[in-house]
Image (cartoon, rainbow, N blue to C red):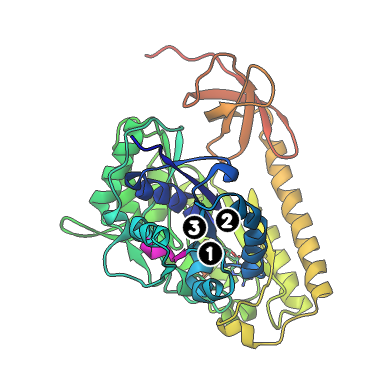
């Protein structure tokens, strides 16, 4: 028997890339590959790249520079470029970087075994088409290995929104939803293998409209069907667009106990003028009304968001409106970025702000968001939460997991197995986590 070949995948960017990296490893398993955590022993290294903010291609070139000695030491080593930089600039990188043996865009991962074989035969290969077949359907069935208690599951990919700053519609292509039956089958398989919490993924996950018997299913319908799977305890989804937050999805937050009370709903800015220039198609007011309705359905829902500061034309008044929106919402968590001009996007044509202005605004916004997140963490002290334990904590006897609100929680729990779902009382708030104490398990009624 020939020794297995070793695959090392380095993942950048969003959760969908994390999911895709796992799928790439599965796609290459029939070609004799097992994954390794050590780049030095790899026969194939895949860089699963992200193109969302600046210097994406530069990062790839410097990573390739770091990998060069490995290639010199191991003539069998092939290097592949995957993900959104591969889609956007793959052909150019292949021309400029001789170390790269293959380039594969996000829609073509099922073609990896063929591309790898071609690269081994000495022909460098690029595959960045948007093929008609579904890459997920074409991937082989997974081995039934046990896995950890949480998993991602991509249900929707691509984007038709064309926010004026964003590369995703170009790198991931048009919006497409996976058929509901395939999603349910994958979820059942994950649960059989030990998964208790599934996060549904999509660039616009709440635009989901998957083919199903009797027509199309919305995300809310899909969530309700997933909730009927025994053994699946928690459902989350990300990332949502405010314009696709439908009545049935809001209602599901009030009605479906397995749907966790946490929502990442990026707003980007609090200024209607800037939102218009961003082509976001919602206003600050419509966003705030949406959150009111979500909170009416599920009062304890914790909100999260993304923000861009320093968008071309943003004035101090526009920025003040963003700060006011943050004050009005009260976020449990949020990500904020300095605007980065992306080649090929409409906003990149407009003159940008001075870097110091944007930097100063980003600092002020981040200070406010951190203050809010910490106040919410502090307010958890004394409250009861349910935690899904995922792994051993840093100290002996400790376990770490997440609360319903996605707070990181650790507790003394000697002998507890990952996957246990337990009630805890929060006893302390630390800067990035909560400390809990196990409550006695109530006897079944
Ligand atoms: N589909 C998601 C966002 C995907 S990108 C959504 O619509 O919310 C993740 C985040 O990166 C965005 O929400 C935005 O805040 C940020 N981002 C995207 N393009 C950017 C750019 N050109 N400069 C700075 N931040 C950007
Ligand atoms: Fe990008 Fe806008 Fe689509 Fe989100 S909704 S992926 S920000 S274009
Ligand atoms: Fe990055 Fe592509 Fe995800 S650009 S954020 S890896 S969709």
Callout 2: CB less than 8 Å from ligand 3? yes
Mark positioned earlier in the residue sequence (2 or 1): 2
Q: Residue at x 28, y 48 (%)?
A: 140
Q: Would you say residue 71 is visible in this rendering?
A: yes
Residue 320 spot, x, y in % from top left: 75, 70
The label on residue 225 is: none
Query: In the image, is residue 194 above or below residue 157?
Result: above
Q: Do residues under tags 2 and 1 come within 8 Å of each other at their CB atoms? A: no
Pointer 1 residue: 100
Residue at 26% of width from left, 50% of height from top? 182
**Residue 133 in magenta?**
no
Q: Which residue is mark 2?
A: 12
Q: Secondary structure at mark 1?
A: loop
Quarter that holds the N terminus:
top left
Q: Comparing marks 3 and 2, which lies closer to the viewer?
A: 2
In the picture, the quarter occupied by the C terminus is: top left
**Could you tell me if the residues under marks 1 and 3 are in contact, i.e. CB atoms within 8 Å?**
no
Q: Give above or below for 436 relative to 80.
A: above
């Amino acid at each position: 028997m020939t020794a297995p070949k070793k695959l090392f995948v380095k993942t950048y960017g969003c959760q969908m890339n994390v999911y895709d990296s796992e799928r790439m490893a599965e796609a290459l398993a029939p070609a004799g590959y097992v994954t390794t955590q050590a780049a030095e022993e790899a026969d194939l290294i895949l860089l699963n790249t992200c193109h969302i903010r600046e210097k994406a291609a530069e990062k790839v070139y410097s990573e390739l520079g770091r990998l060069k000695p490995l290639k010199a030491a191991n003539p069998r080593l092939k290097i592949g470029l995957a993900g959104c930089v591969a889609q956007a600039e793959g052909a150019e990188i292949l021309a400029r970087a001789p170390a790269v043996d293959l380039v594969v865009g996000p829609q073509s991962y099922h073609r990896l075994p063929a591309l790898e074989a071609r690269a081994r035969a000495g022909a460098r290969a690029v595959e960045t088409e948007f093929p008609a077949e579904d890459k997920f359907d074409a991937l082989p069935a997974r081995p039934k290995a046990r896995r950890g208690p949480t998993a991602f599951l991509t249900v929707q990919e691509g984007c038709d929104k064309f926010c004026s700053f964003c590369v995703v519609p170009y790198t991931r292509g048009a919006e497409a939803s996976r058929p509901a039956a395939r999603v349910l089958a994958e979820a059942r398989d994950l649960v059989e293998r030990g998964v208790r919490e599934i996060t549904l993924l999509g660039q616009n996950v709440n635009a989901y409209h998957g083919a199903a018997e009797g027509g199309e299913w919305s995300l809310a319908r899909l969530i309700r069907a997933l909730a009927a799977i025994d053994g699946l305890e928690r459902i989350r989804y990300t990332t949502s667009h405010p314009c696709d937050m439908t009545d049935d999805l809001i209602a599901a937050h009030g009605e479906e106990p397995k749907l966790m009370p946490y929502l990442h709903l990026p707003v980007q800015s609090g200024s209607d003028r800037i939102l218009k220039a961003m082509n976001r198609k919602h206003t600050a007011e419509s966003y705030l009304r949406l959150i009111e309705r979500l909170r009416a359905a599920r009062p304890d829902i914790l909100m999260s968001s993304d923000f861009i500061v320093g968008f071309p034309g943003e004035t101090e008044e526009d920025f003040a409106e963003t700060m006011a929106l943050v004050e009005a919402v009260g976020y449990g968590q949020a990500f904020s970025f300095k605007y980065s001009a992306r080649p090929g996007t409409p906003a990149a044509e407009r003159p940008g702000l001075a870097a110091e202005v944007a930097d100063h605004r980003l600092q002020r916004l981040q200070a406010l968001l951190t203050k809010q997140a910490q106040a919410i963490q502090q307010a958890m002290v004394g409250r009861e939460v349910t935690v899904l334990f995922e792994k051993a904590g840093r100290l002996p006897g400790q376990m770490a997991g997440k609360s319903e609100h996605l707070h990181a929680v650790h507790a003394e729990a000697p002998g507890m197995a990952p996957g246990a779902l337990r009630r805890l009382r929060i006893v302390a708030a630390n800067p990035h986590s909560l400390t809990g104490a196990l409550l006695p398990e109530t006897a079944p009624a």
